[in-house]
Amino acid sequence: MPLVEIEISNPSSVLPDEIVAFLREADLRVNQFLENSPRRATAFVPSDFKTVYHALQAITDSNLASGNSLCEWGSGFGVVASLAAMLEFMACGIEIDQGLVDASRRLADDFGLPVEFAQGSFIPSGAESLAEEAYADNNAAYSWLITDAEDGYKELQCGLEEFDVVFAYPWPGEDHLISSLFEKYAAEGALLLTYDYPETVLLRRKLREPRIVT
């Protein structure tokens, strides 16, 4: 079933004080990580967290989601999942790099946020052929597209179809894979929020299957 774009309102640029404090600390830790782990950091590029927060806020303010569960694909430092938790989503993240998983857990714990992070792949079981094709098309540049990693959903004890919102930051050339995975495996009515540089977001919904009248 196709994905349909949903227009979201232009939110206020004003951030709550607790969000400002959280993002200040998150930015500090992300910058330290990038400085101290230059080789590992080549595959880690954070989105603009303020832009994503406002998009999540618009989703909640307009009651666009069918429920309050959110998964961040390739969660990195887990900032988006943590922001979602601050907006009262039941949030989690899947990240293939164990070091980033550990960092995201420390950040969430330090702010008392109930976010769960799993180490592994966000590629659903059965979607290996889609991922392997994208991996080959990108000359094996994206390590998170490998299909022999641990299943992140297994650690979370839930499936992709159980999430109401999924957030991802696709690399160039990766959006088709992200969209295809979501379109095939997400629940009907679920939302896909993606970030695109510079400072833009795209919100799409998986259409519900139309009734066939006989």
Image: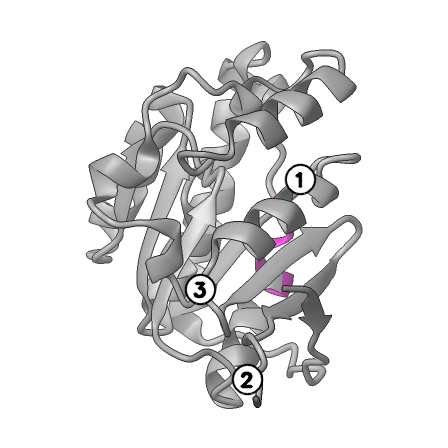
The residue beneath circle 2 is 211
The residue beneath circle 3 is 187
Up-down relation of residue 81 to residue 136 (above or below):
below
Location of residue 211 (image quadrant): bottom right
Location of residue 155 (image quadrant): top left
The disc at residue 177 is: 1
The disc at residue 121 is: none
Going from N to C along the chain, the mark reached first, 2 or 3, is 3
Residue 44, can we see it?
Answer: no
How far is disc 2 from disc 3 in space, using C-alphas?
16 Å
Up-down relation of residue 88 to residue 136 (above or below):
below
Q: Position of residue 69 (x, y in %)?
A: 34, 66
Nearer to the camera, 24 or 126: 126
Going from N to C along the chain, the mark reached first, 2 or 1, is 1
How far is disc 2 from disc 1 in space, using C-alphas?
28 Å
Q: Which residue is found at the position 38% from the left and 57% from the top?
A: 161
How far is disc 1 from disc 3 in space, using C-alphas?
17 Å
Q: Would residue 198 be found to the left or right of residue 39 on screen?
A: right
Q: Would residue 157 be found to the left or right of residue 36 on screen?
A: left
Q: Amino acid at mark 2?
A: Arg
Q: Quadrant of the N terminus?
A: bottom right
| SS state under label 3 | loop
Q: Quadrant of the C terminus?
A: bottom right
Q: Which residue is found at the position 29% from the left and 36% from the top?
A: 118
Residue 42, can we see it?
Answer: yes
Q: Position of residue 191 (x, y in %)?
A: 54, 68
Q: Position of residue 32 (x, y in %)?
A: 49, 27
Check disc 2: other Cα within 10 Å, few if <14, some if 14-19, many if 20+. few
| SS state under label 1 | helix
Q: Which residues are magenta?
A: 47-51
